[in-house]
Image (tube, grey):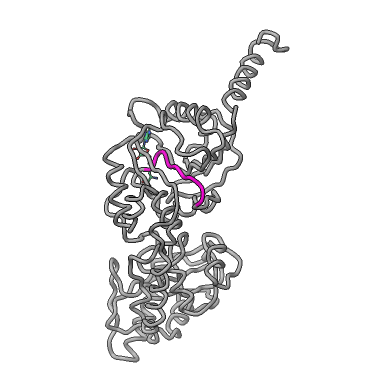
Amino acid sequence: MAQELRALGAKTHSPVAGGAHFSGTLTSAYAANLHSRIASRILWRVAEGNYRSEADLYDLARATVWEREFSPDQTLRVDVTAHRSPLRSLQFATLRIKDAIVDRARDRSGSRPSIERTRPDVQVLAHLDERAAQLYIDLSGEALFKRGWRAEKGEAPLKENLAAGLLMLSGWTPQQALLDPFCGSGTILIEAACMATSRAPGLQRHFAFEKLRSFDRVAWTSLRQKAQAVVDDRAKMQLVGRDISTRVIDLAISNARRAGLGTALQLRSLVFEACDARTGEPTADQGMIVTNPPYGEQSSPKSASVGSMMADVAGQLKRKFPGWQAWLLSADRGLPQQMRLRESSKTVLFNGPLECRLFRFDMVAGSMRRQSAKDRDAVGQKLGKNGDQQ
Ligand SMILES: C[S@@+](CC[C@H](N)C(=O)[O-])C[C@H]1O[C@@H](n2cnc3c(N)ncnc32)[C@H](O)[C@@H]1O
């Protein structure tokens, strides 16, 4: 994400756990909301200070000039996250910060903002560590992975920003053929198509910053117009999504349409088709597979275990996909063993709360032969110490 922000022209500081700080104008924060494919939300730090008690948090929030950004007629929500905070109750800390904001508004204007949990106009977030507290105004509102195109979900869809992250980690470029053999609702392919057509992920939605007093409509309109002008619906790309379920394929197609990719579907530069990954043929001589295969009950047919299905998929990859690179996101650490493939890299990633690994496998010509030779060696070693029974 830090790399992505730098590419957007923001001055980034070092990445921190789960995020990255950057500095710039509010317009650069609008641009990050509009263009970041990876961030979950963009927060604006408005105050910080050391604290030891809830009273210190109250004072910090009370001294912050909230009225510069929102009025008492607007609804508010306050949340607190903490890492090693000495405070006993985060709920109480949240209450004190909220009280401080509300008291300040009442003292200055005679009226107070009301609290709204589900659709607040303004969200304030406090982050507490051992000693320091930081207060933020959330500039995004709804999390940024909500691009505005998803109507229905397939089974276990990836969040859009995780899908974009997988593509970026894989190093895929729009010039390369891309295949997702377990595409579900199409998230990875839709993200890839948006990258290839230079479609900003935030073009179809609203953001919380639009409700702030500092909102610069002229700057925002110009950013959006520029983003719209560079969209190239006819960009060259070769993207194929497959799934064994025709119902899910229909869903992926309607999601892609809603994401503005109707022309790509028409041109067949983006294709969704029903196909079993155990028998699917390559879509080009060389390319990349980026996918998250099913786990547990998601395998089809339901009776076959995922492990044996993945062994069959691996057989197909070894036979038919030499020259391809496959990136598989799975919660199952035993995936390489199931597939009898050695990963060339693995990266730990969280899919929501689920710890997963992104495995990279390089399919080289002859890997099937080498693999069976290895299997023979393994059997040989089991049979006789000097292997002369192979
Ligand atoms: C974890 S989901 C993929 C979710 C997808 N990444 C998304 O964002 O919606 C796994 C998908 O694999 C499909 N599937 C299961 N067995 C399959 C097989 N043998 N061949 C192709 N697809 C299969 C399921 O129908 C399911 O949609």
The image quadrant of residue 21 is: bottom right
Residue occupying the far right of the picture: 386
User: In the displayed structure, does residue 19 sit left or right of residue 144?
Assistant: right
User: In the displayed structure, does residue 14 sit left or right of residue 162?
Assistant: right
Observer-nearest residue: 195 or 345? 195
Task: Name the residue: 33% across, 50% down.
Answer: 265
Task: Name the residue: 46% across, 35% down.
Answer: 282
On screen, residue 200 above or below 300: below
Find the magenta span and give its range: 175-183
Percent of width and height locating residue 292: 44, 42
| Count of numbered labels shown in the rendering | 0
On screen, residue 374 above or below 41: above
Observer-nearest residue: 205 or 234? 234
- Location of the C terminus (image quadrant): top right
The image quadrant of residue 231 is: bottom left
Residue 176 inside the magenta-drawn segment: yes
Percent of width and height locating residue 143: 38, 63
Task: Name the residue: 54% across, 29% down.
Answer: 337
Percent of width and height locating residue 167: 49, 51
Task: Name the residue: 38% across, 50% down.
Answer: 187
The reply to whether residue 355 is visible in this rendering is: yes
On screen, residue 299 above or below 131: above
